[in-house]
Structures are given as structure tokens and as C-alpha cells.
Amino acid sequence: MRQGYYKEGERSMKKRLATVAAVLCLTGALAAGMAACSTPSSGSTQPADKPAAQQPADDTAAKQGAEADLKDDAAQQQAATAEADKLKMLPQDEKAAAAAELYAPKVTKAANGADVQLIPADPYMWNTAILDGENRGCLGSSCHDSLLDTNQLLPMPHPKLWNPYDVEATTKFCYMCHSKALFMQDSMHAIHMNSAEFAEKGGNCDSCHYISPQTGEYLLWDLAKYNNAYMGITPVPNVTGDFSFTQDSITPTDQVFYYWENANHQGVTPDNDTSQAAYDSWEIAVGGEVENPFTFKLTDFEDQMVEKVLKMDCQTNPPGGAYVANVNVKGIPLSVIMERAGVKDTANTLHSVADDGWDVYPVPLSTVNEYLDDILLVTEINGEPLGMLQGFPVQLWIPPLGGCHYTKRVVNLNFTNDATEARLFQGFTNPKTGEMFNKPNTAIFYTAQGTIFPAGQPIELEGFADAYDVPMTAVEISMDKGATWTTYDLGETDVMRWVDWKFSFTPEKPGSYLIQVRGVAADGSVSTDPSQLFFNVK
């Protein structure tokens, strides 16, 4: 896969029949964000051996790929123009058949060999010949192979992120980090509109945006194409199928998302010692508002370690995102440490401090006491010692809070009397609407956008639902763009674990479809941005 900052290699689909005027839309509606993003998924239905998430590629290879793409561009554009010009001169009775062939939506191969078609077929070729869907948006056949690769080619450091469960990244993955700081609306316009490469490819506002016919507002093409722009998606009102769920499923360790948090958020990852000697010598000091301050080694409490299945949901897990895990962890109960220390009534806050001084997300002691039975100093995940990226040799797990509270490489547990109550992070608020971006949240795992399924066969999908500290009560599914929702009640659920749902159904006829999934939590909240999957049946 080419890793260029912009990509043209797939753009064999000709220039447009009509030239769209470039409208300089520097005030357009690029949704804020640019953070955790992932590569397109494998296109499988529900594989027996689920693939490991792909890590971002080498930056040098990415730049070389971009140069190769540029060299191919001119020849491809010339050939496409010649084909389109030839079609224009045909008689009307021949033009329809020729256009259907020339502008048929592309079918490509996913990494596992599955066929993928990202654009619904329509009898007027509206989606391809007029809307030029093959050549718009961030991904697919237009500019970028992957938003993961793109953020590594920025002129400043950015955390290297990846895609557990093969969940495809979109600009939604950028909402969290960039909706309240380092805003993306103006910066992304500046990067693109001042890029010689973007200009050479004929880039303009139409490349990234869709103009709403109702409001005239500029929307992001990638977020509007299936819900607003494309023809040919078959609605299925009140969809039904076989639904099931479990809270006991275990995330494979290589699918558990981590990145190294830094004070400057640049994602510079250290190379820490992960030897047995480092584990044996690791010490944690307990102090502050306690009767008996003491220092202990992890080995001192090995006989009191317990195992639990617990979730970790990243605070910045985007809508439809994959930064969530449900794993078997082993560690020292915090309750054991607190009992030995004798925490005073004057204490109101827990500060878990890392070996590099990281002490950013303290927790109110009232919250600690509420969830005390499930808070562990974790040393193993799924039967294996923590890896370096996971915080070897010990990480504080404190579900059901956001993952930012899970301090890696703990060396101090300080119980303090703070003047102000510590802030909890349990989901991310949309600063424009005041609603939660990702609480409750859902995602669809292991299936690529545009996957082609065989007609007459059941389609099996899987994903998660979670709302941090609020229990999930239902999962709702729509196949008519949200006009109707079918509710699947969950009953009482354990807030310390995720909901791993499965849905199987058989479409009545071939066509293109859009399925949306949203969660309902015990406080009545509903996902504001449902996860969705476009697919085809042939």
C-alpha cells in the first residue's frame, strides 16, 4: 500500500464530464479533529482468526510512495480524459451503455481478498459521473491511503496510532483531541490550500466537501456521502435479525490499544527496561494522608494478586472508534494497599504518579471508594506481563473511568487533601452542542466499508457498546438512515465490562445497504453519532 501524503494511484476513473468550479471555502465545515485514526479494515465478515491491527508505516517509504504517485498522475489523467471525451460524442442510444461501463463503481480487493465496492451502483451513474465519488474525500480512491499514515507526515510529531479490530478511521477519529485545542477547521484548510501537491492534483473545496441542498452548508464529503449524497442505497425499515451479546469476550492482547501519553501530547515513546530484574526491583511509595506510609515491591504482594475481566475505554475513543478493550487482568487490589496504609478521613484525592513524574489525572477518593473492589495495580494482561507500551511493570486500572486515568509505571500513590475536587474523565463533550461525542458509543468490528456479501447468505456483524460509568441497557439498529430503529434490550449489564454484540441478518435482495448501530444507556442517553457500515449484496 502506498503511504503518500496524497495518493493518486487509484484515480483511474477519469476527469469529470463537467468541470466543477473551485469555490474557496476556507470557512467550510471541516469537523474539528485529527487524532486517533486507522487504516481501512480487512473486509471480512467474522474471521476465525481476527487479524492483528496494522501499525503505521515507515515515513521514508511514505514519501517515496507519494513521489511515485505523482509520476503516474499525468498519464492516468490523459487516458481518463480521452475516454470521457470519446463517450460524449456517442449517440444517445449508445451513450447509456458506454457510460454504465465507464462509470461503474470500482470493485477492489481488501487485504484478505474480499471484494470491496465503496460506492453504490445507480442507474444514472449519478454517484460516479456527476458526484465524482471516486475522487472525493480523504480515503478510498482519492488522496490518502490512511489517515494514520498522513498524521505521521505532518511537520510536527504526532502520536503513532493504529486500528484495533480493523475499524476504519475517518475524520471522526480526530474529534476528541482537536475539538477544544489545536483546532482543525482552519489548519486543515491552510495545509491543503497551500499545498503544491494538492493544487497539482486539481484539488479544491469540492475535493473535501459536500454542499447540503437543504442549508447550503459545506459538509465533509466523507461524513455526508452515504447519508446525504449517494443514490442507490436500499432502505430496510424496521430491520430484524438475530441479536446476541456477551460481556465475557476477551480482546486479544495485540488488539488492546495503547499509546504513550506525554505532557506535550507528542507521543514520544520511551524505551524502558522490561526485564525480570526491573520487575523484581520495582518499588511503589504510599504516602500523604495515611497513618502508615510505606514502600513496597510488586513481589511483596504476589500472593494477594487477583484476576478479573475488566474493560478499558479510552477517554478519546472516537464515535464508532476502536480504542476499547475487555481483557483478563491480574494485579494487586488497591483495597489491600489502602488498608495497610490506613488512609485518613482527611484524604479526598488519589494521585497515582508515574516514574517520569506524570501526575495529570487524579481521582476523587469518593470515586475510588465507589469502585474499590475493581481497582487493581495490574501486572499482567491475558496471562502475560505488561508490555513496554502498556506500562511495564505496573499500571493502575480504575474502571469505569476513561483510560487517561490508568497511570502507567506507577511509583507513588499519594492520598491528599486537595482544595478542589479532581475532575473525572468519562467520555468527551462536543463543545458545539454540549452533547457527548462518545457516550454511549458503539463500533462495528472486522468488516470493511463497501464489503460485497453473497446474496441469500446471512451477514454476521460484531461490535461493542459502552458508556463508561453508565450501564448499557440497549443496542439499536437501523437500515433506513435512522428513520426507524429496532431496539434490542440488554437487561442489567456490568459497568465494569463492555457489551460485545453480534447481529445476523439476510437481506431480501441484492443491492447496496447502510446499517447504523447506536447504544442506549441506563440514564436514557443515546449515541449522538451512531457507527455505520456501507455494504453491498450481489
Image (tube, rainbow, N blue to C red):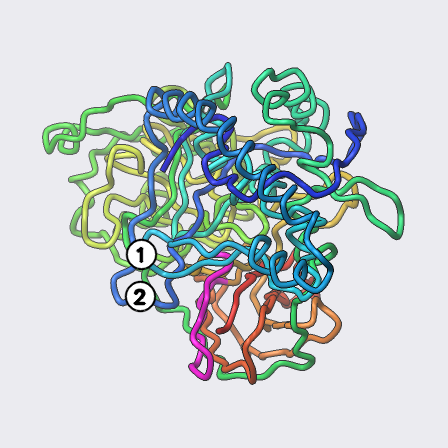
Quadrant of the frame with the N terminus: top left
The range drawn in magenta is 449-464
Front tag of 1 and 2? 1
Badge 1: how crowded within 10 Å, few (<14), some, or many (20+)? few
How many callouts does the rendering have? 2
Residue 532, by quadrant, is bottom right
48 shown above or below 426: below
The residue identified by callout 2 is 47
Residue 131 spot, x, y in % from top left: 70, 48
Crowding at dot 2, Cα within 10 Å, few <14 / some 14-19 / many 20+, comes out as few
Q: How far across and down, in percent of the image, does residue 196 sit?
A: 60, 15
Tell me the element at label 2. Answer: loop
> In the drawing, does residue 185 fall left or right of residue 306?
right
The residue tagged 1 is: 112
Question: Residue at position x 81%, y 29% from top?
Answer: 23
Relative vertical location of residue 492 with respect to residue 451 in this rendering, above or below: below
Hey, what amino acid is under mark 1? Asn
State the residue at coordinates (40%, 59%): 43
- Residue 95 in percent (x, y) is at 67, 58
Give the amino acid at mark 2.
Pro
Q: Is residue 455 inside the magenta stretch?
A: yes
Q: Are marks 1 and 2 in contact (CB under 8 Å)?
A: yes
**Can I make out residue 210 in this image?**
yes
Label whose residue precedes the other's in the sequence (1 or 2)? 2
Q: Which of these two is toward me, 511 or 177?
A: 511
Residue 424 visible in the current orientation? no
Residue 400, position in %: x, y?
49, 53
- Residue ranking furthest to the left: 277
Residue at the image point whose x is 17% and y is 40% from the top: 300
Asked whether 183 falls inside the magenta stretch, the response is: no
**Closest to the observer, 39 or 68:** 68
Dot 1: what SS?
Answer: loop
